[in-house]
Amino acid sequence: MKYLPGIIFLIVSFFNLTITDVFSHGPTRQKLKESITINAKPEDVWNLIKDFGKIDIWHPSISKVESDGKTRTIYYSPRNNTAIKQKLENYSAEKMMYKTSITEVDIKFFPVNTYTANISVKGNEDGTSTVLWKAAFYRAYVNNDPPPELNEAAAIKAVKEFIQSGLNNLKKKLEN
Amino acid sequence: MKNFLINLWIFFFIFLKVSFSSDLAFITNQLSNSVSVIDLETYKVIKEISVGSRPAGVAVTKHGKRIFVSNPESKEISVIDGYKLENIKNISLGKGPLGIALTKDDKFLLVADWYDHKVRVIDSCTLKLIKEISVGKSPAGIDTDLKNSKFYVANRDDHTVSVVNIKNFQVEKVLKAGKRPFAVALSPDNNFLYVANVKSNDVSVFDTKNYKKITTIKVGKSPYAITFLQDGSKAFVTNQHENTISIIDTLNKKNIKTLEIGEYPEGINFYIKTKEVLIVNWFDSEVVVLNSMNLNIKKRITVGEGPRGFGNFIGPNLTKNWNIVYKNNCG
């Protein structure tokens, strides 16, 4: 019985951690800009990535995706197959780019908040293409003094892994 | 002849003042923990000053002697000396200082704290804490009126704006805004208060005489900050998630134009001298100089990483020697 206050504290902290106001965030936004040059025509690169609902055909770490064309739920295998719900914010076939946001995520596995990202394809003079993937997001912990698993570094690591593995596999697929 | 000489002297001094007075913009670079100082005559960055951790908010005194910067991550206010352009002091303050503003007499620095839901009042001269005012949840943007009688603060996670009396620092009224209000801006005549609502993608307009909400104007995605032309005829709003600015006709209270500007536009200030609008693009790490009349982009100035420039970031350039005569007080 003497552990009861401790247990209550733990339960309360757990709820505070997981059931947070989804639109709150800390004061500092993070950014990442990753790109890769692929020995393929921009049209061919775009053809592979253009379908928002079929990211699993080129991203190696997505075990399953459910999509209605405007939203998608991806199951991200390196992080416990966690479900990440995303929304298509903007799409331009002409510019070969689209913008997505995360609408629901379990921060225990993917510690980010208010994430938006833009993926685009550009042709280079030598006939190759460059894919640019830009992301803007906040750390998962909305209060000050975050624990290490929910801090800026943890958020950057999660997003970087997600983007880099996608880009690397895209290159591999198109160049083989 | 004597009169002529005196006139010539006066004319000479006016000429000196006009031709040598220039201004600076102080841009907070959140991801490089610094402030980029832009000379608004040459549009060049003349200095990058180290401040605290994750700087966001900025406020410059009228005479440019002090520049204040909020650092929410290190929980400090950095004080920059306008003559030397050096960070002279970091003051520990609260749990997450974010939006900051000076009263128009430059006596008080108001600091909204994102985490403990208070606005702190600092004496801008002695840098002493004078008062703590409880406001709504996650207070952010602040604006102050011309008469030094009231200030307004947007409470982001309460969807409200607190109206605070500067004479006694009491909250007089709480206004219901749209969803997640972040920035507030008074029209130049102070008759209207504009509030940018990040989640409802609109601007609430209040009449400051009776605090009634007059209208709500649709803008782009995730509006962040607002500035007015000097005559108040137009308001410019940055839309973070749309890479655009919205231009509002304030007479008809309508959004009349949307303009592509760059990625994640955030802080925005009107620069009276050149009638240009300076817009801080967070993702592109640049300041865009926009001609407010023909809406042409005149220049893109590269600054530090992840600039936010949240607040009034323009002030006079005091780095030229002849200004040293004013050095004694801190305003």
Image (cartoon, coloured by chain):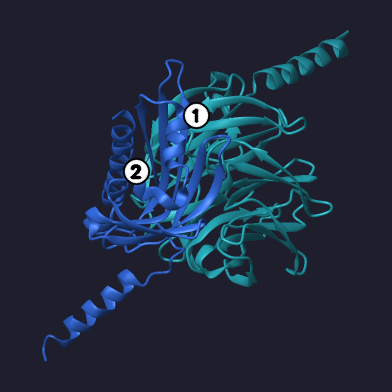
Chain colours: A blue, B cyan
Locate the C terminus of chain B and report the quarter of the image it occupies: top right
Above or below for B20 versus B238:
above
Which residue is tagged 1? Answer: B37
Question: Which element is circle 2 on?
Answer: loop
Q: Mark 2 lies on which chain?
A: A
Q: How many marks?
A: 2
Report x, y in % for residue A106: 32, 64
Q: Mark 1 lies on which chain?
A: B
The reply to the same-chain question for discs 1 and 2 is no
Q: For this rendering, which residue is in front, B291 or A30?
A: A30
- Give the position of the N terminus of chain B as an image quadrant: top right
Dot 2: within a 10 Å radius of its alpha carbon, few (fewer than 14), some, or many (20 or more) residues? some
The residue sitting at 66% across, 53% down in the picture is B185
Residue A63 picture quarter: bottom left
Q: Regarding mark 1 in the picture, which secondary structure is present there?
A: strand
Q: Which mark is residue B78?
A: none
Does the rendering let one see residue B39?
no
| Residue at 24 percent of width and 57 percent of height | A79
Q: Tell me if residue B272 comes above or below residue B222 in the rendering.
A: above
Tell me which residue sits at (29%, 61%) in the image. A82
Horizontal side of residue B123 vs B167, given as left or right: left
Residue furthest left in the image: A2
| Residue occupying image coordinates x 55% and y 37% | B280
As drawn, the residue found furthest toward the front would be A176
Is A146 or B33 nearer to us in this picture? A146
Q: In which quarter of the image is residue B48?
A: top left
Report, in whole angstroms, how far the alpha carbon at label 1 lies from the one at label 2.
Answer: 44 Å
10 Å neighbourhood of mark 1: few (<14), some, or many (≥20)? Answer: many
Residue A5 visible at all: yes
In this image, B325 relative to B213: left or right?
left
What is the x, y in percent for residue A105? 36, 62
Residue denoted by label 2: A58
